Amino acid sequence: MMLLMSVRAHVFVVDRFSYPVHRSKCFCGVKNPHNEDMRNRVYADLFAIRKGDIVFFYQRRIDEPPEERGFRGIFRVISEPFIDATDVGWGGNLVLGKCPHCQSEFSELDDASCPACGGKVGWLSIGRKKVITQHILPNRVLIEPLEYFEKPVDDNTAYVNRLNEGSIWSMLFRKIYGPGRERSINQILPEEAVKLRRLLYKKNEGRRASFERKPYKPVKKRQIELELGEGGKVPYESVLQAWIMKNIDKGIPIFSDFVPTKNLEYWGNWVTYGIGGESVDILVLYKDKVRYKAVPIELKRERIDVNTIKQMYRYAYWMAQFSTAYAKPPVKSLILQPICIGFKASSSAINEVKGIREKILDIPYPENSCKVVVEPPILLTYNVSDDKIEFQEEFSAQS
């Protein structure tokens, strides 16, 4: 059986029109929102990807029965993210790189109209519902098939069937929370990737399949650029998140003193952990044979205040469970080190942190108990300078 426990994995959302194109042309296409903040959120998702990472597709419902949609895979990333406005087609289906009317690279709105010119992208009527059949997806990454299974894993098998060990926690809460939480890309935990692979293998009775393919070659490939802004502050919190995702494993000065690159197992942004849609801006996990540390990071474009500190302590228990519940090998002890990053840190926030002491959480899992040591939060400030982001330590109990 293929080993996925140490491999980072992502799920790209497609539909029955775009999936054949992505699969057979060997790329993943992602929307380019006209809203700048939302566009930077997409960039953050893309910048979390590295060559060699694993890709699953999730085919969302349009009008097909459950057994014809769900999780599909498995593919491997072979390029850095890039922009290309080339239209790519396969088998009568088309993924656009730009508006067919005005050539804008912004993706279509929910009513299938271009946000730049108002022209309609391809769509059809299914019953009373209008369905978009051609998506504008200029943000891309190239992939190659690793293990391909013909039959997908449906939602009930993936999320509901308790006979299947583990959980796909990373995506479950987004799904049940409803509209507004959808993402084109979701990072998933290594143990979730293992579960998806196991389910695909079982669903297909171990039979791998082949498919016709002709890999797409980018025509006018461009780098994805972040606009960091001027005057010290980023224009959006999402820019700070995207920049960290792009550079987290590259040894960022000061930042890497507290988020080191050694033993990095997983990093993800906008990680949802609660049934009410609660999320943490960034989560980093460390493993040396066994997962031993989790670093939830809260980002603030402006100032870190007392409420930020209290917010991190409210979700410490749930982040501890998220990081340990289904990990393999089982985690018996974990360090949870919260970090807050903002442009400034209020004196009240610094004083609040100075009064916090190490906290012990005992999680009595049925198979084994897990002891979690919650460390006092570390406070860092950031500053935009010379087209990069620099960090400074404001408070750390380690210093």
Image (spheres, helix red, strand yellow):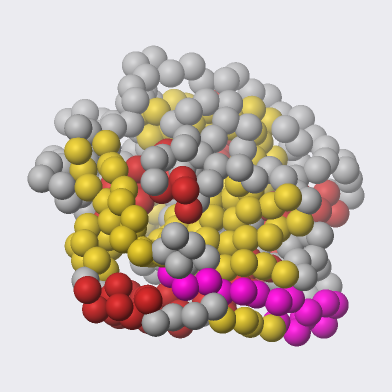
Hey, which quadrant is residue 178 in on the image?
bottom left
Boundaries of the magenta span? 363-377
Residue visible at 68% across and 30% down in the picture: 145
Q: Is residue 82 left or right of residue 331?
A: left
- Residue nearest the viewer, comparing 60 with 399: 399
Asked whether residue 133 is in view, the answer is no
The image shows residue 213, relative to residue 48, as above or below, that is: above
The image shows residue 248, relative to residue 302, as above or below, that is: above
> Residue 228 at x, y = what percent?
21, 41
Residue visible at 33% across and 22% down in the picture: 222
> Residue 214 at x, y = what percent?
60, 19
- Residue nearest the viewer, comparing 389 with 223: 389
- Residue nearest the viewer, comparing 271 with 89: 271
Most distant residue in the front direction: 399
The image shows residue 297, relative to residue 15, as above or below, that is: below
Residue visible at 33% across and 31% down in the picture: 224
Asked whether residue 210 is in view, the answer is yes
Quadrant of the image containing the N terminus: top right
Quadrant of the image containing the C terminus: bottom left
Q: Is residue 145 magenta?
A: no
Q: Is residue 242 left or right of residue 184?
A: left
> Residue 2 at x, y = what percent?
83, 41
Hey, which quadrant is residue 303 in on the image?
bottom left
Residue visible at 64% across and 28% down in the picture: 144
> Residue 265 at x, y = what percent?
63, 48
Q: Is residue 365 magenta?
A: yes
- Residue nearest the viewer, comparing 255 with 77: 255
